[in-house]
Image (cartoon, helix red, strand yellow):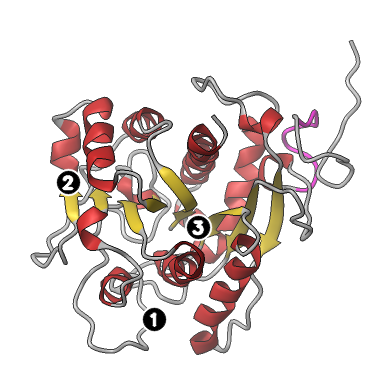
């Protein structure tokens, strides 16, 4: 049976699957059509190619393009292990990347916030692909404008709440401290999963560190998360360095002892139907440090899982 090839350039619908050579065509996320028209759109995938806040290795500005490229591996079939198929049921598009002047770094946070404002103001969910983890801060601000103070579900090796006395500092290790202090994030109803670096000041955030994950089942971890967050509006951010470097070597600040891809996916699937997700992101994929694309593949898989998780609460 012959299959008529379609691509992001020629697709006339934002539902269903694309039959095209995996290694050919324009690398939109999951071959979704590129558009800035969000009328009736459920999820908009967007890239935030910013990495000027890194404290170690740069390169995450190339993350959105790499994750899009590797997502083509999954563009032909429904996501495995989910009863709900978001790509046949939901309208999902690739919104393109946030535009900013790389030479005016101080202006970038507002540009990101405005970019996400344009997605969420009419009810479309934003799935952002970073970029270093600082980008989550202006993204959170945009979501808080619409949904109010947020619970943060953070998968990460680092807390990113280190002390910082300068509100103007652009640093991917301090921004959640500012978000908590500003009331954007509610610490007592937030959870950090996979932490394995020392920061004595937790800012009141609940921590399920990497050793705790390893000694628990994904269902146990997910149930603990759901107990803490409850029915509050929740933003989920997945720093790829939550995964052990064996599964995600291409990142700026790798830390040994992290989660496996299977553990992370198991936790996300066990959260199905239990979180009121208002937005999500995958950040810190740095392709230059990964010759085989392993990290971008992991990032693309996590992004697909996040689409399914969002759909499991919103559309069932």
Q: Position of residue 36 (x, y in %)?
A: 77, 60
Instruction: Give x and y (percent) for residue 236.
Output: 40, 51
Q: Residue at x 35, y 77 (%)?
A: 171
Q: Secondary structure at mark 2?
A: loop
Q: Earlier in the sequence, mark 1 or mark 2?
A: 1
The answer to the question of whether label 1 and label 2 lie on touching residues, with beta carbons closer than 8 A, is no
Pair 3/1: label in front: 1
What separation in Å lies between label 1 and label 2 (alpha carbons)?
26 Å
Residue 170 is marked as: 1
Compare marks 2 and 3 and give the one earlier in the sequence: 2
* Mark 2: few/some/many CA within 10 Å (<14, 14-19, 20+): many
Residue placed most toward the observer, 262 or 180: 180
Which residue is nearer to you in this view: 147 or 54? 147
Q: Secondary structure at mark 3?
A: helix
The answer to whether residue 196 shows anywhere in this view is no
- Say if the magenta span includes residue 225: no
Query: Which residue is at a point 74% across and 56% down the rendered structure image?
Result: 38
Residue 103 place in picture, x, y as percent? 58, 87
Q: Residue furthest top?
A: 1
Q: Residues within 10 Å of mark 1 (few under 14, many from 20)?
A: some
In this figure, which residue is indicated by the disc labeled 2?
209
Left or right: 310 as drawn, with respect to 150: right
Instruction: Work out whether 110 lies above or below 210.
Output: below
Q: Which residue is disc 3 drawn over?
A: 288
Range shown magenta? 17-26
Q: Main secondary structure of the magenta part?
A: loop
Secondary structure found at label 1: loop
**Looking at the image, residue 316 lies above or below residue 118:** above
């Amino acid at each position: 049976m012959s299959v008529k090839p379609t691509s992001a350039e020629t697709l006339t619908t934002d539902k269903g699957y694309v039959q095209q050579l995996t290694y050919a065509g324009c690398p939109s996320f999951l071959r979704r059509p590129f558009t800035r028209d969000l009328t009736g759109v459920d999820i908009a995938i967007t890239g935030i190619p910013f990495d000027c806040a890194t404290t170690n290795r740069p390169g995450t500005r190339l993350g959105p393009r790499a994750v899009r490229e590797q997502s083509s591996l999954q563009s032909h079939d429904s996501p495995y292990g989910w009863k709900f198929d978001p790509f046949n049921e939901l309208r999902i598009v690739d919104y393109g990347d946030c535009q900013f002047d790389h030479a005016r770094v101080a202006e970038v946070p507002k540009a990101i916030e405005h970019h996400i404002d344009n997605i969420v103001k009419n009810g479309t969910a934003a799935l952002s692909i970073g970029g270093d983890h600082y980008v989550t801060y202006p993204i959170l601000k945009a979501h808080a404008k619409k949904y109010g103070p947020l619970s943060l579900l953070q998968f990460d090796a680092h807390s990113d709440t280190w002390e910082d006395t300068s509100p103007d500092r652009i640093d991917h290790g301090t921004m959640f401290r500012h978000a908590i202090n500003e009331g954007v994030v509610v610490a007592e109803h937030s959870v950090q999963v996979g932490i394995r670096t020392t920061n004595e000041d937790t800012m009141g955030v609940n921590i399920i560190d990497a050793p705790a994950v390893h000694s628990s089942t994904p269902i146990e971890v997910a149930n603990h998360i759901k107990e803490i967050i409850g029915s509050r509006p929740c933003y989920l951010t997945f720093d790829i360095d939550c995964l052990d470097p064996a599964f995600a070597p291409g990142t700026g600040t790798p830390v040994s002892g992290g989660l496996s891809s299977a553990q992370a996916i198991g936790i996300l699937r066990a959260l199905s139907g239990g979180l009121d997700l208002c937005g999500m992101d995958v950040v810190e994929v740095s392709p230059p440090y990964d010759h085989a694309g392993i990290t971008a593949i992991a990032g693309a898989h996590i992004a697909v899982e996040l689409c399914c998780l969002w759909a499991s609460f919103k559309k069932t």
